[in-house]
Image (cartoon, rainbow, N blue to C red):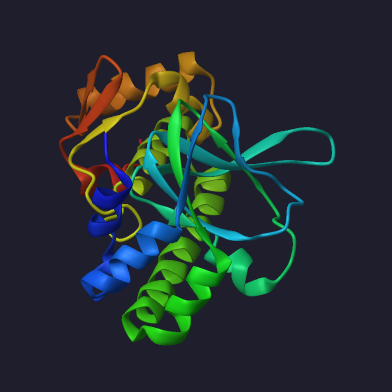
Amino acid sequence: MFTLGEMLHASLWSRSLSPEQMKRVESEIKTRQVPAGGFVCRKGESVDHWIGVIDGLVKMTNLSADGKPTTFTGLPAGGWFGEGSLFKEEPRRYDVVALRNSVVAYMPKSTFIRLLDTSIDFNRFLLIQLNERLGQFIAMVEYDRLLEPDARVARSLAAMFNPYLYPGIGPQLQISQEEIGYLAGLSRQRANQALKTLEKAGLLRVEYGSITVLDLEGLRNFEG
């Protein structure tokens, strides 16, 4: 399990900060334990923080007018999100829910703005992160419309190994079959079937409570 300090030092945006700047940022961030099923943040709330996942796994999700849930992406430890909402000065437009017991960092908007105003490297990081996230969401629309369930599971898993959005993640991801089903929009049983197909293809190894990726490019390009 990461501590806040370890997570901050692993974050790409923090590497240009001086020790004094890092100490100040760390002192201003609040952390919270969010139980499985609990809300990290909620749709309609004012956006007062940039949010990072120190430990655990959360999902960005929303409900349609008829109550149908849609999962946009999973966010493992090491990921930061919500910069777009901070820029737009509007209520949050999605829920973020913990898929398992998680520890979450909340950076105050004032700290975020100070970094934005004083750090060129922080601005560069945000530009690249926004572009990576946009590419991820465009791909998600493609997956839902064009791909069969096995391929959707493959791409959903591959998306969580983005080295820019989620630095520090090794080849093994602590995730259950039920959680994979949530992220891919499938039942646990169908997700399990897809994992067996991907394992047979030599792309990953299924272990108790985790997935070890053997061929990341293969997952990214799998079509079934």
Q: Where in the figure is residue 8, as x and y percent of width and height?
A: 30, 56
The answer to whether residue 56 is above or below residue 218 is above
Instruction: Give the number of marks.
Output: 0
Nearer to me, 134 or 49: 49
Q: Where in the figure is residue 67, as x and y percent of width and height?
A: 79, 33
Residue 92 image-quadrant placement: bottom right
Residue 108 image-quadrant placement: bottom right
Q: Residue furthest right?
A: 65
Q: Where in the figure is residue 19, as x and y percent of width and height?
A: 22, 70
The answer to whether residue 100 is above or below residue 75 is above
Nearer to me, 202 or 11: 11
- Left or right of 219 on screen, residue 68: right
Residue drawn 35% across and 42% down?
A: 77
- Left or right of 135 on screen, residue 119: left
Residue drawn 47% across and 13% down?
A: 189
Nearer to me, 153 or 106: 106
- Left or right of 209 on screen, residue 131: right
Q: Where in the figure is residue 105, as x and y percent of width and height?
A: 45, 48
Looking at the rendered image, the quarter that the C terminus falls into is top left
Looking at the rendered image, the quarter that the N terminus falls into is top left
The answer to whether residue 136 is above or below residue 34 is below
Residue 210 image-quadrant placement: top left
